[in-house]
Image (cartoon, helix red, strand yellow):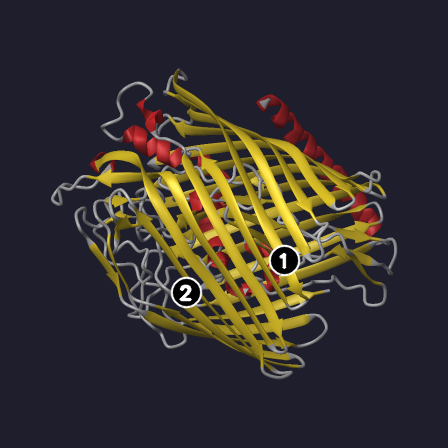
């Protein structure tokens, strides 16, 4: 199976070279064109959770511009879809930096980039992160490279998000949800070339460059996307320098062949690398190498019953190097030394590698008032480690397989009412090896997942939904490896004493619109049996290390919370909106709050728009938090553990941050944007912070890491 995927990757490279030459020749053959774009739409009560892009086609034969459709996130729905451009993305660093703008998300800061995220108190590793080419996962045992660190949001068009266990279509179901970053699929009637470029400068010597170019004709298109970003160490509001410099670059290409009027083939090829310094860790990330390959073929309108058939394969190769000696980050040094030869550096402290192979097939059936999505998927996951610092030899330490069969059904016979349900059967297998390639442990498990949801459109201005979902989650790589390293797990196969997490969760929500007022509410309540938790040594004088973990075990957990929002269109020029989120999670065994539960948070936004100008301000408010945490903590993100072990009170003061931005449409082709984040230079830190949660590294005794102080940025966008 592995050799088969490798052959496919080499074949895709050859196809890319041939298709580039062909498409460039056709792109300039005619000055006139008609350009079609499949639009993203907010997933309403009349759309299913699975839907990423609508099937409607929009044409503009007179202007010939790329049609960019933006939509605000409709948080009232369990499944949302939005254009990334609508999320004020002119100054973001990575996917975690983007997600923190959405109600319910919080960020765990490690440095300037590659930070991890939390949604409703559920850490990022317990959620699925997918891109065009399938799921992507980091390789570092200490989560120095979360999946979001390999995603440049500016290189994607659409953000899809399903809250909770309310779909079964995208791999193993999780209690947190599923996040997808995807790109449009454009169609050309005649040959044309389109380009969009962004250039951003800002505080702390930051420079961000992005270019997106499409060559297309009636036979297909090729889309080339790249970015190169850099930033120095940031300073907090007290002008203290924070060890946080970073550098990133990515290049992705999409090739599309229109095989028939109802069939098209898409080939995805991508590569990236970078470096990041961390303020909360003993090591810095020297290499964040990514190679991605994917192929997707979709056939639609086959007959009266089968409406679509989709098949996809993908491959991700992640290579990550950590080192404990600090090298200043600069674009010259990273480009010349690390990006091209990161594998040859011998001064690293840890060198890891992960390869993902996956395949997915799905058939969509449509008859009368029923719509059914059925399919099967499989993913192979191979993790490797370097034997020693002086050798380039690697050995496989973990190999896992996840395969599932799923069916999701939509019943739409009732007037303005809909019932959606799905079931999935998952088989997971994992093997552990020693550094000689000998298999030590092996385990496998067959488990189900499913959901059912009722949606009701009371009127065109009001709808509500109520759903219940159930899922199991097999212990992930980080949990199993941490369990293996602790002193209490030396017996054979004791690593698999960790039971899978079992979740049952209710999601309810509503959306209403009347005159100029729009509002939404999204609430949830869940019970997680066998939630994976860890206990730490209660000796306060002992130096922290992996061995300070006494044991990892399963506990019972309750979670509940809500997100809500309200917007008001004052007149043709003024618009205001607000949202608030409050999550809660309780460890019933140890009688303490889950450590990654964020405090009450709200946001107010006011915007003025007139002709070519937009001026806006955002006011973020976070309440103080004081949690009694007992002696336990989540194993993930594996670097944020309680500062003390017994009856620790973790306190962060409340804070408020005001940011402003302005946009000017200078001409048909140029747009200028300028903004200031943390306008009044507020000195603050997030609740999930190294000062409140102890790090398993020799840097654990560092001072608190505060958020960046006043940060200005300027952006120029060119599109034609």
Which residue lies under the disc numbered 1? 456
Which residue lies under the disc numbered 2? 204
| Quadrant of the frame with the N terminus | top right
**With 85 as the anchor, is 307 left or right in this view?**
right
Residue at the image position 23 percent from the left and 27 percent from the top = 488
Residue in the foreground of this view, choosing between 492 and 157 = 492
Residue at the image position 80 percent from the left and 58 percent from the top = 35
Residue 448: x and y, percent?
A: 52, 32
Give the label, 1 or 2, closer to the camera.
Answer: 1
**With 428 as the anchor, is 480 left or right in this view?**
left
Residue 238: x and y, percent?
A: 28, 70
Q: Alpha-carbon distance for marks 1 and 2?
A: 50 Å
| Quadrant of the frame with the C terminus | bottom right
Residue 477 placement: quadrant: top left
Query: Of label 1 and label 2, which has the lower sequence position?
Result: 2
**With 533 as the anchor, is 382 left or right in this view?**
right
Regarding mark 2 in the picture, which secondary structure is present there?
loop
**With 701 as the anchor, is 675 left or right in this view?**
right
């Amino acid at each position: 199976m592995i050799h088969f995927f490798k052959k496919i990757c080499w074949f895709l490279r050859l196809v890319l070279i041939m298709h580039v030459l062909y498409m460039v020749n056709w792109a300039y053959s005619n000055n006139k064109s008609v350009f079609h774009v499949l639009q993203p739409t907010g997933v309403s009560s009349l759309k299913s959770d699975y839907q990423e892009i609508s099937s409607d086609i929009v044409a503009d034969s007179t202007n010939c511009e790329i049609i960019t459709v933006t939509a605000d996130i409709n948080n009232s729905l369990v499944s949302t879809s939005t254009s990334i451009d609508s999320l004020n993305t002119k100054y973001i660093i990575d996917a975690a930096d983007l997600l923190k703008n959405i109600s319910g998300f919080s960020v765990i800061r490690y440095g300037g980039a590659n930070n991890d995220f939390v949604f409703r108190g559920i850490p990022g590793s317990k959620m699925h992160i997918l891109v065009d080419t399938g799921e992507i996962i980091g390789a570092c045992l200490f989560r120095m490279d979360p999946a979001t660190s390999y995603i440049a949001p500016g290189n994607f068009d659409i953000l899809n998000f399903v809250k909770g266990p309310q779909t079964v279509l995208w791999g193993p179901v999780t209690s947190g949800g599923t996040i997808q970053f995807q790109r449009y699929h454009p169609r050309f009637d005649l040959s044309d070339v389109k380009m969009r470029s962004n250039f951003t400068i800002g505080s702390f010597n930051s420079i961000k460059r992005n270019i997106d170019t499409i060559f297309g004709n009636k036979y297909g298109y090729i889309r080339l996307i790249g970015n190169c970003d850099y930033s120095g160490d940031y300073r907090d509001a007290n002008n203290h320098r924070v060890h946080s410099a970073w550098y990133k670059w990515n290049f992705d290409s999409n090739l599309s062949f229109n095989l028939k009027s109802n069939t098209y083939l898409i080939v995805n090829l991508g590569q990236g690398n970078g470096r990041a310094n961390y303020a909360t860790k003993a090591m810095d990330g020297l290499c964040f190498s990514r190679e991605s390959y994917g192929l997707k073929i979709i056939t639609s309108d086959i007959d009266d019953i089968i409406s679509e058939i989709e098949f996809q394969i993908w491959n991700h190769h992640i290579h990550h190097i950590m080192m404990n000696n600090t090298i200043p980050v600069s674009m010259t040094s990273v480009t010349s030394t690390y990006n091209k030869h990161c594998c040859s550096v011998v001064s690293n402290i840890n060198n890891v590698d992960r390869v993902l192979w996956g395949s997915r097939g799905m058939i969509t059936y449509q008859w009368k008032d029923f719509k059914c999505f059925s399919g099967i998927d499989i993913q192979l996951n191979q993790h490797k480690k370097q034997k020693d610092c002086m050798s380039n030899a690697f050995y496989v330490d973990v190999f896992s397989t996840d395969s599932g069969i799923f069916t999701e059904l939509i019943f739409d016979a009732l007037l303005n009412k809909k019932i959606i349900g799905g079931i999935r059967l998952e088989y997971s297998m994992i093997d552990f090896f020693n550094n000689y390639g000998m298999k030590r442990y092996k385990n496998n498990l067959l488990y189900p997942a499913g959901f059912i949801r009722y949606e009701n459109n009371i009127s065109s201005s009001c709808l509500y939904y109520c759903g219940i979902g159930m899922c199991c989650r097999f212990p992930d790589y980080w949990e199993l490896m941490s369990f293996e390293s602790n002193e209490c797990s030396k017996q054979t196969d004791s690593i698999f004493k960790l039971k899978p997490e079992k979740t049952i969760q209710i999601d309810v929500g509503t959306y209403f619109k009347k005159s100029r007022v729009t509002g939404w509410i999204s609430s949830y309540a869940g019970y997680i049996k066998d939630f994976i938790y860890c206990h730490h040594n209660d000796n306060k004088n002992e130096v922290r290390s992996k061995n300070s973990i006494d044991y990892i075990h399963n506990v019972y957990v309750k979670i509940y919370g809500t997100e809500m929002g309200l917007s008001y269109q004052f007149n043709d020029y003024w618009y205001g909106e607000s949202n608030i989120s409050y999550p809660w999670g309780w460890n019933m065994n140890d009688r303490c709050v889950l450590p990654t539960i964020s405090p009450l948070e709200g946001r107010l936004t006011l915007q003025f728009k007139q002709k070519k100008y937009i001026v806006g301000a955002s006011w973020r408010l976070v309440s103080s938090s004081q949690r009694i945490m007992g002696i336990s903590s989540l194993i993930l993100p594996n670097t944020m553990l309680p500062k003390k072990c017994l009856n620790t009170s973790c306190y962060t003061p409340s804070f408020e941050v005001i940011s402003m931005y302005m946009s000017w449409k200078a001409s048909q082709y140029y747009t200028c944007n300028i903004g200031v984040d943390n306008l009044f230079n507020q000195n603050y830190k997030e609740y999930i912070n190294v000062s409140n949660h102890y790090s398993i590294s020799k840097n654990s005794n560092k001072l608190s890491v505060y958020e960046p102080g006043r940060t200005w940025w300027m952006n120029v966008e060119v599109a034609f």
